[in-house]
Image: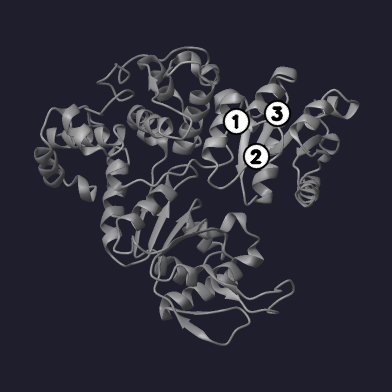
Amino acid sequence: MANARDTRMVMIVDSEPAQQRFLSALVARGGWRSIAAGDTDTALAKLGTQEGMALDAVLVDQGTPGMPIAEFVAELRRWRPALPLIVITMRNGVEVAVASMRAGASDFVQKPIAPDRLLGALDRIVAPNGPQGELRPLTEKLRAPLAFEEIIGSSPNFRSALAIAAKAARARVPVMINGKPGTGKEVFARAIHGASPRARGQLVMVDCSAVSPGLIGSGLFGHERGAFPGAFDRQVGRLVQADGGSIIIDHVECIPLETQAKLVEFLNSGEVQMIGGSIRQSVDVRIIATSASPLDKLIEAGHFREDLFYALSTAQFTLPSLSERRGDVGPLARHLLARIGGLPGMGPIGITDDALRLLAAYAWPGNVRQLQDVLFRAATSSKTDVLTGADFRAIEAALGGGTPGGEGDVAINGEAIGVTLYLPDGNLRPLEEIEADVIRLAIGHYRGRMSEVARRLGIGRSTLYRKLSDLGIDTAA
């Protein structure tokens, strides 16, 4: 493997010359040289050439002619087991992504390709000191809309955030969600929209961290043709696109001050004016903003407007990190595996208690997103349908090679495995709270199939729905 940044080489496997040129120019920005192959057979043949032997990575599009991509990945693995490979899939190409990962792909990215995301993926797969094995992060999120009843968590700080979110969903006010990366801000934002009177309307998302600061305003408000250099066509903004629905503004802390001022004006007037335009258009949209950085510190530093903060924070809450709710790791792992098992190309996946103990002992700096990535990688690489401690060697190594044990790790009843029974002061939690958590866990485990939930809990459907109402699970109380 080449170590110097300016000598790294990637093979681009794509049949479209324009796409080859685009990808070649893109990777060049990250210090990569590239060679190209128009089909999978040519790509495999190039592995034995002088250039092929110098490769540091392979980038292959799912639509490349030749053998199916999963077969290509498996064949490449046979000849070059250690050569990192990224598969480019369509936006709805989950089945291709799963098959490719099971065949041995290192990662996948979805179209339309975000340059920074692709370059980040390339850098990660060749980083000698980065996370390895199942701890290597996935570039793409495994998005799946969740209702509040399916969001798993029993710690008091998490339940408090859940209750605020559920109450805010029924209102029309803006919502501000704070939390470290990977804590589930997008999941909560989507659940708020799904539980709101606007659920039938559009849900539009803008990730301000993935857009050049100078283009965020154009993306939100739109622009007229010729409004600025490069504005060759008129573009409708995301706020107008979300009219009648909701817009998630992710990483709101990245918005430049000039655009912040326009956003304050919109929140006060409900009217959008395109950049370079003179007409004002009334728009009815609910803003759900998220931030990974403490906005109070940005306000003090003069990087975030105080009036915008208060306008967006009519309802606000902070999601705790996963290390702050260790007792949720076991139920979360089971819940996430149930959802992963439902992906195209996957199947039911179990997990042993020793594996859950291992997961509960890890610090999870990447929070729930990292846990999901680890479980997905373990599930796609495992030879069986039950994950054991042997499927989490990288976590075991990070923990120093030992399997954790001790108070709070007892199978089924302990915090690492099932529902939390004890309060931080050592006293038992109220039976009503424990029962609510058991029902919530069952709903997540059986993916909302209420007949199956009732059958497994040994109660009738009418009794289950009565308990949902009595316990306030439908409002996440």
Q: Amino acid at mark 1?
A: Ser
Nearer the N terminus, badge 1 or badge 3? Answer: 3
Instruction: Give the foreground label among 1 and 3.
Output: 1
Mark 3 to mark 2 CA distance (whole Å): 16 Å
Q: Is residue 130 left or right of residue 21?
A: left
Q: How many marks?
A: 3
Q: Position of residue 23 (x, y in %)?
A: 76, 47
Residue ranking furthest to the right: 50
Q: Position of residue 152 (x, y in %)?
A: 32, 38
C-beta proximity under 8 Å, tags 1 and 2: yes
Q: Amino acid at mark 3?
A: Pro
Do we see residue 384 in this rendering? yes
Instruction: Give the foreground label among 3 and 2.
Output: 2
Q: Is residue 409 left or right of residue 455?
A: right
Q: Which residue is mark 2?
A: 62
Q: Which residue is mark 3?
A: 84
Q: Position of residue 310 (x, y in %)?
A: 40, 67
Q: Is residue 65 left or right of residue 353?
A: right
Categorize mark 1 by other alpha carbons within 10 Å: few (<14), some (14-19), many (20+).
many
Nearer the N terminus, badge 3 or badge 2? Answer: 2
Which labelled disc corresponds to residue 100?
A: 1
